[in-house]
Amino acid sequence: MAAPIKAAVVQAAAILFDKKACLDKVETYTQEAAEAGANLVLFPEAFIPAYPRGLSFGTVVGSRQDWGRDHWLLYWENALEMPGPDVDRLGDIAQKNGVFLVIGVVEREASEGTLYCSMLYFNPDGALVHRHRKLKPTGTERLIWGEGRGDDLQVLSTPFGQLGGLICWENYMPLARMALYEQNVEIYLAPTADQRDSWQATMVHIAHEGRCFVLASNQYVHKDMYPAKFQEELATAPPIMSRGGSVILSPLGEVLAGPLWDQEGILYADIDVKACARAKLDFDVCGHYARPDVFDFAWKKEA
């Protein structure tokens, strides 16, 4: 049987557009979580180098501005290059602290100019064991991030249970969720940039639907955290760009920690996946509620 663990969900702002400073902050918070006894640590969506809320990069339909390309270049330069020393450092942070580290990043491959919104998984030995790229960037995110291939929806078998997740509004894609449920996901990770009350309802729904623990991590960001070159474009933006709302839920949708609002911090909860089996007494989306005589589901693992 999987061993019980202590999970940590970090709610914090990136040091926007500064990859090195972001990595330093990851190290600080991971060490704090590990010293508190955490075995699994989750960071928000696009924690390195930023979720660029409120920015246009000088782009409208049919036109791009030179100043926007300059902003884009700064974002691109501070994205994680894979493979590379920044990825190695994240592995070192996981190994040094003996934790399973999962973090949202903006990444690119050395051979590409395209950026992707991704979730990286590092085991306690420091190995990068999985990368998931966001399947469908939402709205104007499509201007800055490419689409994932969809061949990376694997749920990982770990000593503490079946671990997997989706990024932000991927969680509104029923078939993407079904791909995880089909693999018996027990600890469901949802790094996000969504601060709305409706997101809280979505997390509760997923916990009920999947009969799984749900860990949702968001950033707490205010406008003056942005570098000076972005302040003119953000002149009419509210002072608080993201209130947070990180939360941890049980397989019956009960709130175990959070939601955390208007501050940075770490949420903790004890996770024992035997609770997932207990919750499936009366509902199992891939078992006695599946009705395979009526419905077919297929995930195209080879994109």
Image (cartoon, grey):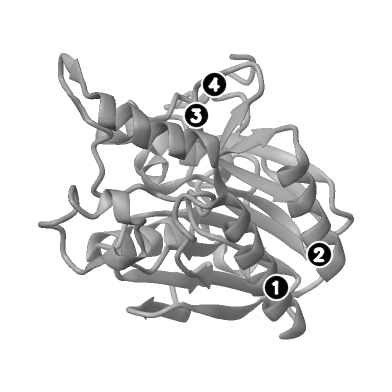
Quadrant the C terminus occupies: top right
Compute the Cα span from label 3 to label 4. 13 Å
Q: Nearer the viewer, mark 4 or mark 1?
A: 4
Label 2 secondary element: loop
Marking on residue 247: none
The answer to the question of whether label 2 and label 1 lie on touching residues, with beta carbons closer than 8 A, is yes
Marking on residue 149: 4
Marked residue nearer the N-terminal end (4 or 1): 4
In the picture of the structure, the residue carrying the numbered disc 1 is: 272
Looking at the image, the residue that sits furthest to the bottom is 36
Q: Is residue 110 left or right of residue 5?
A: left
In the picture of the structure, the residue carrying the numbered disc 2 is: 2
Q: Nearer the viewer, mark 4 or mark 2?
A: 4
Q: Nearer the viewer, mark 3 or mark 4?
A: 3
Marking on residue 115: 3
Compute the Cα span from label 4 to label 1. 32 Å
Q: Amino acid at mark 4?
A: Arg
Above or below residue 290? Residue 20 is: below
Compute the Cα span from label 2 to label 1. 8 Å
Marked residue nearer the N-terminal end (4 or 2): 2
Q: Amino acid at mark 2?
A: Ala
Decide which of 117, 284 is in the foreground and name it: 117
The answer to the question of whether label 3 and label 4 lie on touching residues, with beta carbons closer than 8 A, is no
